[in-house]
Amino acid sequence: MKNPKVSVKVDTNEFIWDKNEGLFTFDGAPALLFWDSAIELFFKTIEEVSGSDVSITVFEATGFRMGHLVSNYYQDRFDILEVIEQYKDIYRNAGWGNVEIVSFSLEEKKVIIRLKNSWEHRIFQLMDREQSGVLLPSHWAGVFSGLLKENMWYKIKKNQLMGHDYEEIEITVSSTTPSSNIHKLAREKEQQRICELESKVEERTAQLTSLVKDLSSPVIPVLDGILVIPLIGRFTEERFEELIEKALHEFSRRQASHLLIDLTGMNQFDEFTIHGLERLIQAIGLLGGECTLVGVSPSLSIQFIKSEISLNTLTSFSTLQHGVQYALEQSGLEIVKKKKRNTL
């Protein structure tokens, strides 16, 4: 009977295949074997689903935590210097490429690592990328964070994809952690979403403002030469400027002679509104037109009387109908009720 277990020892590392159980172990720990093309597909799928910025943070967090896991597994079996010495064999024998610990300072807590033909480099070549991967550099940051009991992070000094013979990574003490990167990304995404919402609000507000401008003070042609402009709500300086500009434009374009200013929608006047009304009347007068106030309630009459502005020379009526009749008379026109025809 063939041996159901196959064991291979490479240097100090042992690989065991248990064919009956379908298990593979690397130095006693369960492990997996993947083709580079399968990992490439894994990378591409994460980037496709989450986007490039999110995927970078995902790879960094994954690599760091994997490194931390490796350091926890080996540090109880060897001291730090022995682990560092054996790492080049461990990673090389696992197919992770050639690893060289160029320098290690326990006092400075600084490590220089060189990687050549790593699996991440091979995959990025397949993906036709120029920038370095982040999973293995962050993985080594996790390894030494675990070994040295410090928060450490990486800096890529040389990139094999850019033509160097190897990738050189510097690992030093840092305040950067996967968690801080995740929180930073979350804040950036939140801020991006806020900006998008603010942009939509601004766009919608502009649309509504434009609509309000069109509806709040429309210039309505009643009869030939007679226009009506209703005043509704509270006026600001900007709104009154737009009102005067619109009234003058329509008055001139339609060659009108009378402008009826309808105050039915006004509950009260402040000094600013009364001054604005006076400016509108004067502006229409400069075009040779006449203004008439209509829809004047008793309460508005009292407010006019109390104001310092004199509108005594201005004709006013309590209803729009009376104002239209007055404008027709001033224009030499009248509305005649049509007589019914007698039928046999």
Image (tube, rainbow, N blue to C red):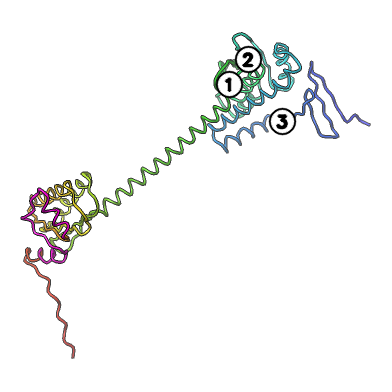
> Can you give x and y, in whole percent of width and height, for residue 176 in the image?
55, 22
Q: Mark 3 points at which residue?
A: 34
- In the displayed structure image, the side of residue 54 where residue 325 appears, left or right: left
Asked where in the image residue 48 lies, by quadrant, the reply is: top right
Disc number for residue 114? 2
State the residue in front, 320 or 82: 320
- In the displayed structure image, the side of residue 67 where residue 289 appears, left or right: left
Q: Is mark 1 on a helix, strand or loop?
A: helix
Q: Quadrant of the C terminus?
A: bottom left
318 within the magenta span: yes
Q: Quadrant of the N terminus?
A: top right
> Can you give x and y, in whole percent of width and height, for residue 105 in the image?
62, 9
Q: Mark 1 points at which residue?
A: 161
> Of callouts 1 and 3, which one flags the residue occurring earlier in the amino acid sequence?
3
Q: What element carries label 2?
A: strand
Q: Give, as a single range, the part of the protein colored magenta.
A: 298-326
